[in-house]
Image (spheres, rainbow, N blue to C red):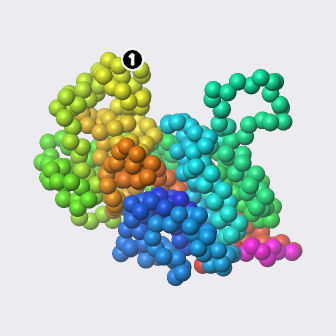
Amino acid sequence: MKRYRFADLFSGCGGLSLGLTLAGMRGMFAIERDEMAFRTFAANLIERRNAKGNFDWPTWLEKKAWDIEELLKSHPFELASLRGKIDVLAGGPPCQGFSFAGRRNEDDPRNLLFEKYVEMVEALQPSALIIENVPGMRVAHARRNVVDLLPPDPSSRKVSFYDKLVESLSTAGYHVDAMLVDSSAFGVPQKRSRLIAIGVRKELCRLLDGGILRAFQLLEEARVEQLETLSLPRFVTAADAISDLEIGDRPLVECLDPESPKRFLEPSYDGPKTHYQQLMNHGHVGSMDSMRLARHKDEVRERFARILSECRKGVRMDDESRRTYGLKKHRIYPLAEGDPAPTVTTLPDDILHYKEARILTVREYARLQSFPDWFLFKGKYTTGGERRTKECPRYTQVGNAVPPLLARAIGNALARLLDEVAVAQRKSASPIAQPAIATA
């Protein structure tokens, strides 16, 4: 089977790249501007002893945190030299300005990073594209506090950033379509709805039975096969994912992570209990990374204990409940152990453990995102204030990531799609020569 090559833009800590490599693809390079997130990416997908076959990194590209605009300015000719050598360009521009979980901001400069994404598409001309983002990317932003004095002009219909992106990519030569997927349907123990857009070069798309929609047929086939291959149930619950990480009556030991301040504790680890935990723990040797427990004050623990005993689990606390417990946060979910978790966000105090009066550890977050236990996280654990828009600590890295099991299925679907294109090219009386499917 041909091993297709990919590049990952806005890669974050590496969830999408990890999933694509698990699907048998080989990376060329990855671009991530945050230093902490790229350190995590490099530690697992470039520097790790078993990571040698993951990437064929170009010699001209320094292995560091890159801003995509800086890369386009610094290496235009080198990027152009990769045309025809990259099969899949992956990665979704940052989603904060589109998200319903925060303040949707039409003018958020991160929203315009999709323009740089399109520039990279034009420079590299890959055969296929993957864009992962929040569902809000497909919803047009509303202008607030504006009164229209004239009747609306039908020709001035608001368009979403997704619509703008599709139009730009069509001009660049790609057919694009998208669908909403729930990560829990792919074996991820988390109800995480995401917009998955897939693009294929127009001249290649014509060779597919069903056109661009064939990609989503193959994604569904890959989803079903993934659950069967990994022996996963229809839904993996929160307890299935993290029950082996409960404190219980285990002794607590000092957290020796060099990037953590002193006086933090973490539980010892006894080993996996469920099939999902065995899958995540496979290949892991030594102590578990990012197990540090939060240091809650007594009154905070007491409040959390009351919430767990008195409030409905598995749903977000309503306004009345939050007022009852003196909580100012808008989003607090007590986990339900028998259901998949809600969407893991970048804020560690959004989710309460289903049994223990505490928030989750980074490792528990990672389990809910389907990161394997050998995957290390680098940088600070949390940040605050103005630094939240400038830094990407561990909780943020995990919360922003594409779940690797979802990415694995997407990778398998695209590999089959490119296989079908290659077969159709060989059968065609006048095979398409450019762009060629890159060879391994």
* Residue highlighted by disc 1: 320
In the image, the segment drawn in magenta is: 430-436
Residue drawn at (26%, 65%) of the image: 285
Mark 1: few, some, or many residues within 10 Å (few <14, many ≥20)?
few
Residue drawn at (58%, 54%) of the image: 92
Question: Is residue 322 highlighted in magenta?
Answer: no
Q: Quadrant of the N terminus?
A: bottom right
Task: Choose between 211 and 379: the one closer to the eye.
Answer: 379
Give the answer, above or below, for where 221 lies relative to 58. above
Question: Is residue 432 highlighted in magenta?
Answer: yes
Work out whether residue 276 can be spotted: no
Give the answer, above or below, for where 47 lies relative to 328. below
Asked which quadrant contains residue 262, the reply is bottom left
In this picture, residue 293 sits left or right of residue 190: left
Residue drawn at (39%, 25%) of the image: 317
Task: Choose between 82 and 280: the one closer to the eye.
Answer: 82
Work out whether residue 99 can be spotted: yes
Please, what is the dominant secondary structure of the magenta stretch?
loop
Residue drawn at (32%, 35%) of the image: 352
Residue lying at the far right in this picture: please name it: 429
What kind of residue is marked 1?
Glu
At which x and y percent is residue 357?
Answer: 24, 34
Task: Choose between 60 and 41: the one closer to the eye.
Answer: 60
At which x and y percent is residue 79?
Answer: 63, 74
Asked which quadrant contains residue 43, the reply is bottom left
